[in-house]
Amino acid sequence: MRQLSVLFGLMLCFTFNLNAQKAAPSPDEIASSYLEAIGGADAWKEIKSIRLTGKASMQGQEFPFVMTRTEGNKFYQEVSIMGSKMEQGFNGETAWMYFPLQGINEKTAMSEEESAEFKNEEFLDVFIGHADRGFKLEAVEG
């Protein structure tokens, strides 16, 4: 009986040791698995628009939002902040904002620099062709 217990204990140690040596997936492997889970990069590239609805939280407050993005890097975003609506959009050429809490009481064009940032933002999942687009994925311990 004692030999069986010792054998069982050694088997457990060996099993835990094998599991402990299992390497974590690389950032690129995680990105590939993610893309596969959402239907694949080719399927994602066929999407023409996307609408996100959710809530952001900051300092104990919730801010419901709706964001719509379409190809051509166009987007519209609406956020409810303390009962007031903040809107932001980009029509493919010019970005604009409406934010009464900051005194912007009508849709106002943003600067050319801000518009250029929106124009350069691609309508792709960040993981699709990340290396070709100049992104590097890294594992960060925190």
Image (tube, helix red, strand yellow):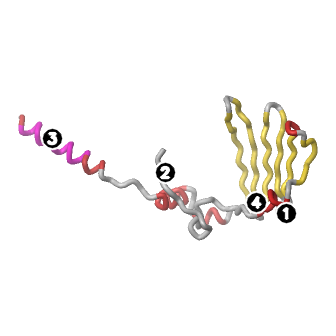
Which residues are the magenta region?
Answer: 3-16
- Closer to the camera in the image, 118 or 70: 118
- Specify the label residue 93 is tagged with: 1
Rendering quarter of residue 116 = bottom right
Check disc 2 and give the amino acid type: Val
Question: Quick check: is 9 in the magenta stretch?
Answer: yes
Q: Earlier in the sequence, mark 1 or mark 3?
A: 3
Mark 3, residues whose alpha carbon is within 10 Å: few (<14), some, or many (≥20)?
few
Residue at image location 82% in from the left, 56% down from the top: 90
- Residue hosting label 4: 117
Query: How far separated are the C-alphas under marks 3 and 2?
Result: 37 Å
Q: Earlier in the sequence, mark 3 or mark 2?
A: 3
Q: Earlier in the sequence, mark 4 or mark 3?
A: 3
Query: How far separated are the C-alphas under marks 1 and 4?
Result: 11 Å
Check disc 1 and give the amino acid type: Glu
- Residue hosting label 2: 140
SS state under label 1: loop
By secondary structure, the bulk of the magenta-drawn segment is best described as helix
Query: How far separated are the C-alphas under marks 4 and 3?
Result: 62 Å
Do the residues under discs 3 and 2 have CB atoms within 8 angstroms?
A: no
Q: Earlier in the sequence, mark 2 or mark 1?
A: 1
* In front: label 4 or label 3: 4
* In front: label 2 or label 1: 2
Mark 2, residues whose alpha carbon is within 10 Å: few (<14), some, or many (≥20)?
few
Do the residues under discs 1 and 4 have CB atoms within 8 angstroms?
A: no
- Closer to the camera in the image, 122 or 114: 114
On the rendered image, what quadrant is the N terminus found in?
top left
- Residue hosting label 3: 8
Outermost residue to the right: 106
